[in-house]
Each structure stands twice: as C-alpha cells, then as structure tokens.
Image (cartoon, helix red, strand yellow):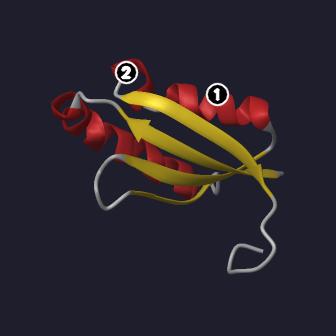
Amino acid sequence: MARFVVELVFGDNQDERVAVRPAHRDYLATLVEQGKLLVSGPYADQSGAVLVYDVADEAELKAVLAADPYTPAGVVAETRVHEWQPLMGVWL
C-alpha cells in the first residue's frame, strides 16, 4: 500500500462546485468505508482541500481521482499529488 497526499486547488466556478459537492462528499464517504481515504477537508478559505489516500499504487489513485464527481464537473483547477511517507501520528 502507498499513501498519497492530494491537494485540490478549486477553480473560480464556486457555484458549480457547491452544486456537485454533495455527490463528491458521498463518494469520499464510500472511500473512507473502503479504507482508501484516511482524512480529507477543505481549507478554511475554501480555496482548495487536502486529502490523504491509502491505495495500492499511483495507478489506483488516478482511478480514484478520475471517479470523483469533481473531476467530470471540472471544478478543480489544479491537483497536486505527492507520495507520502508518514513518520509519526495516528495513521501508522
């Protein structure tokens, strides 16, 4: 298994993002149930979000991100992905 930190930078289309957000959150809830999403949440200023995934590899992460309702809605301006090696904390 590999852990990835994903940063979403939201685009200017806030109304569209808010409209698709319930589907996005429902999707994330299924990933939590499957053990693939460890934590997620938006920045306080609503400019983006951080998500931490625990998946088999980068190929699985790409599939997970592609299936997120935010992807076809085009409400994310940029996605930054970093494989992460946690050293301390509750997810070890």
Residue that numbered label 2 is attached to: 74
Whether 65 is drawn above or below 22: the answer is above
Viewer-nearest residue: 87 or 3: 87
Viewer-nearest residue: 13 or 63: 13
In this rendering, the count of numbered labels is 2
Task: Left or right? Give the position of 26 relative to 53.
Answer: left
Q: Residues within 10 Å of mark 2 (few under 14, many from 20)?
A: some
Residue 23, image x, y percentages: 32, 38
Whether 89 is drawn above or below 81: the answer is below
Amino acid type of the residue that numbered disc 1 sits on in the rendered structure: Ala
Task: Left or right? Give the position of 11 relative to 4.
Answer: left
Viewer-nearest residue: 63 or 75: 75
User: Which labelled disc corresponds to residue 18?
Assistant: none
Amino acid type of the residue that numbered disc 2 sits on in the rendered structure: Gly
Q: What residue sits 40% from the left and 30% below the top?
A: 76
Viewer can see residue 73: yes
The C terminus - image quarter: bottom right
Ranked by sequence position, the earlier of labels 1 and 2 is: 1
- Of all residues shown, which one is farthest toward the left? 15
Residue that numbered label 1 is attached to: 63
Q: Are marks 1 and 2 in contact (CB under 8 Å)?
A: no
Label 1: state its secondary structure. Answer: helix
Residue 9, image x, y percentages: 43, 39
